[in-house]
Image (spheres, rainbow, N blue to C red):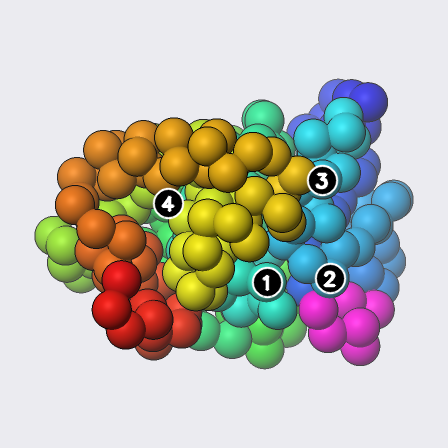
């Protein structure tokens, strides 16, 4: 199903991915009554949004919190960007320091709006993005790009297919191949083949190294520690 972006560049349909119902309600009111977006859909998990996109739903713009129950950090943004089509992704997050903003933009975000922003900020942000621009928090430029390690991690993660990104996330959560195969309803041999491809694309030799690279893109403290001994 196609999105509903209007001819004048305004957005007609938006998806908000956030697990806080009160924030979703407040943001929905702002987007409808102040920004002028007619239809607001919500998802409280990244996987829910990915499933809906995979089933053919489409939105004119997608808003993403970086910290969700099933994903944290930039790995969620990278996974979403790969399946979102032409829809711009706007990060709406309480984490809004310069490094996070810079890394989110590099990972494909078209805008970054701190959660505490006034409604006028959202209006300005969506006008800029609808016109094809990049919106950053007021007074912020990007002179301090993320460290080279973070840049390389984002670049490598962006090479993964959506299925491989899902498998990597499960590896980061400590799941072994058998559990991943069960969760995804695929053969364990298929999981092993994906893991091999993931390691090749990431340029690593072990599962632990793959987790550490994913953590680099997620600012080090947003994913669980890799289980010892693997």
Residue visible at 84% across and 64% down in the picture: 29
| First reached walking from the N terminus: tag 4 or tag 2 | 2
Q: Of the numbered discs in the image, which one, if any, rests on residue 44? A: 2
| First reached walking from the N terminus: tag 2 or tag 3 | 2
| First reached walking from the N terminus: tag 3 or tag 1 | 3
| First reached walking from the N terminus: tag 2 or tag 1 | 2
Judging by the rendered image, the residue that carries numbered circle 1 is 70
| First reached walking from the N terminus: tag 1 or tag 4 | 1
Q: Dividing the picture into quarters, in which one does residue 13 lie? A: top right
Q: Residues within 10 Å of mark 4 (few under 14, many from 20)?
A: many
Judging by the rendered image, the residue that carries numbered circle 3 is 51
* Along the viewing direction, whichever of 69 and 74 lies nearer the viewer: 69
Residue visible at 12% across and 52% down in the picture: 148
Q: CA distance from mark 1 to mark 4?
A: 19 Å
Q: Dividing the picture into quarters, in which one does residue 86 lie? A: top right
Judging by the rendered image, the residue that carries numbered circle 4 is 107
Residue range of the region highlighted in magenta in the rendering: 19-25
* Along the viewing direction, whichever of 111 and 198 lies nearer the viewer: 198
């Amino acid at each position: 199903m196609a999105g509903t972006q209007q001819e004048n560049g305004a957005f007609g349909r938006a998806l908000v991915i956030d697990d806080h119902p009160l924030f979703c309600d407040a943001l929905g009111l702002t987007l409808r009554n102040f920004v002028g977006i007619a239809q607001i859909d919500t998802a409280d998990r990244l996987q829910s949004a990915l499933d809906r996109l995979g089933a053919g739903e489409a939105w004119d713009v997608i808003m993403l919190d970086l910290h969700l129950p099933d994903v944290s950090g930039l790995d969620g943004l990278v996974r979403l960007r790969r399946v979102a089509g032409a829809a711009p992704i706007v990060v709406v997050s309480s984490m809004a320091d310069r490094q996070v903003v810079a890394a989110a933009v590099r990972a494909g975000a078209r805008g970054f709006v701190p959660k505490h922003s006034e409604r006028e900020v959202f209006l300005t942000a969506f006008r800029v993005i609808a016109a094809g621009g990049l919106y950053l928090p007021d007074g912020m430029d990007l002179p301090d790009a993320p460290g080279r390690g973070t840049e390389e991690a984002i670049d490598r993660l962006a090479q993964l297919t959506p299925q491989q990104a899902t498998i990597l996330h499960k590896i980061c959560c400590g799941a072994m191949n058998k559990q991943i195969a069960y969760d995804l309803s695929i053969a364990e041999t298929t999981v092993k083949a994906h893991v091999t491809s993931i390691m090749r694309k990431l340029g690593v030799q072990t599962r632990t190294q793959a987790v550490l690279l994913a953590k680099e893109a997620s600012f080090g403290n947003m994913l669980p520690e890799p289980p010892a001994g693997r």
